[in-house]
Amino acid sequence: MLTDQLLLDYKRCQRRAYLNIHGDWQLRDRSGDFRLKLRQESSRHVQAIIDQFYPNCVYLPELDLSTQGWQQQAQATQLLMQQGQECIYHGVLYRSDYRLPLVGVPHLLIKQPGTSCFGDWCYLPITIQLGRRPKPEYKLMAAFYAYLLQDVQKTLPPFAEIILRRQNIHRVDLKLWLHKLQQALAGLLGALASTEEPEVFISRQRCNLCQWYSHCYTLAKSHNHLSLVPGITPSRYQQLKAIGIDSLASLAEISSEKAILGIDKEVTSTLKQQALSILENRPLEKTSQTFVNKPLISANVEFYFDIEAEPERQLDYLLGVLLVDRQANTETFYPFLAEHPEQEGQVWRQFVDLVTLYPHSPIFHYSEYEIETIKRLAKLYQTPKEQRQSILSRLVDLHAYVLNSVIFPVESYSLKSLANWLGFYWRNPHGSGEQSVYWYDQWLTNHDRQSLQLILNYNEDDCRATRHLKDWLSTFSPQSIGDRF
């Protein structure tokens, strides 16, 4: 059968869909804590929408995932539609007249005035998603459900809807997306019928939550695949392959002046340097035609700043600061932690009070997020304009500095990747921003202080890693000695 989940996997990654059918499931990663948390959040979100807007929804029993079970559930769903139920939760839509049987389970089927084989009413599909915007894969799934419904009720639904976070409702253009659906279904069938699995391509934003990640990464690593080179996007990879660049060695030998359709010369030069850096396992000073970094600042007292945040709650629950006094040869970690979400304002004021004690000390961090968070919290908690501007003027984003000055022999320019290469290691090797969010959720749910301690340790290590990176950068370039405050 061709299910909605298989189609969704194909839309996200052809290789994932192929492996879900033909791969050895013993090679899949176990579901991590953060992945499980997302599933729980999604279930809570769906239930909250139903409770608020569709309290009289009819629930079908748990699915039997055999072929016969799908068919029985589809028949039960059709019976409820014939009865004219106002709302059906997890109804099964089954279509057998395609090259393979098609099965979809929309979150909701909602009764609407209209004409169908059931009478003077019809149904439209609603999907409920955790995202904040209607992603293409959400629209494709909505079109898939509408396509299946057309066969069941003998009329195309008037529309299909996606309910996002904050009850944001998006109506899908079925005329456009039914056409794209037919293309996707044909592509999926072709991919599944192939005797060769699709080429591996590691795209961390999409791959990190996939259970085939370790399997695919091991394969990519064994072949030194170009997708492991920072800056190689899927489109750039295809452009490079078109001119015979398919290995680190060939990328390192490319002429920096070579014109590549769709890739400008400066990007080509950077990719060449990146390949050289990886092959020689050494950092290189980046050659840039458009940007020159200012020297890194050094001071007797410096701050190293890192934030832990919960995007779903729009909450910054930990503002961690490492204060380094180079003159006194001391360093002190200040974890401003909101044990309860309503303490965010208190945590922010504690942070402001500390950094105000040293009004000329630079505040080093490793992402744009810290800048945006300071702006948000200062506005939210009505910090005086002069105080806000003073803090913002002292921020030094080491991530931006690195991207414009140094090529590292790494696969990712995350703080952890760079610090690990420089010899700094986190106490918990499995710690991450996503894991921190899971630990905080565990704290709020179970009041387990061990979860809080794991968060504090991870954040302190982030701050110390930022300091480690800054110290290394200060010695790498002769221009980085800089002026002292």
Image (spheres, rainbow, N blue to C red):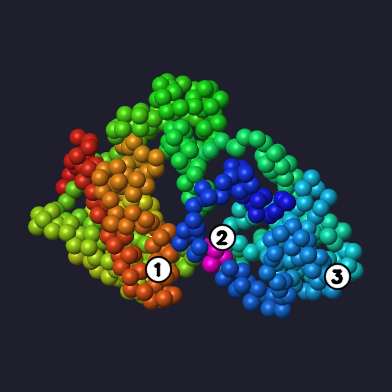
In this view of the protein, which residue sits in the foreground, 107 or 124? 107
Give the amino acid type for the residue marked by disc 3 in the picture. Gln
Could you tell whether 7 is left or right of 237 in the image?
right
Instruction: Assess disc 1: are there few (<14), some (14-19) or many (≥20) residues with their C-alpha within 10 Å of its C-alpha.
Output: many
State whether the magenta stretch is mostly helix, strand or loop: helix
Q: Position of residue 64 (x, y in %)?
A: 70, 64
Q: Going 75% across and 72% down the picture, which residue do you hit?
A: 87
Query: Helix, strand, or loop for circle 1?
Result: helix
Q: Residue furthest left?
A: 328
**Could you tell me the amino acid type at mark 2?**
Arg
The residue pinned by badge 2 equals 132
Q: Dot 3: within a 10 Å radius of its alpha carbon, few (fewer than 14), some, or many (20 or more) residues? A: some
Q: Which residue is mark 1?
A: 440
Distance, label 3 to label 2, CA atoms, is 34 Å
Looking at the picture, how far across and down is residue 360, in whole percent?
Answer: 20, 56
Indicate which disc residue 82 carries. Answer: 3
- With 305 as the anchor, is 63 left or right in this view? right
Q: Earlier in the sequence, mark 3 or mark 1?
A: 3
Q: Secondary structure at mark 3?
A: helix
Magenta span: 38-42
Label 1 to label 2, Cα distance in Å?
A: 22 Å
Going by the numbered disc 1, the residue's amino acid type is Tyr
* Mark nearer the N terminus (1 vs 2): 2
Q: Is residue 12 above or below residue 354?
A: above
Check the image and report above or below for 200 versus 273: below
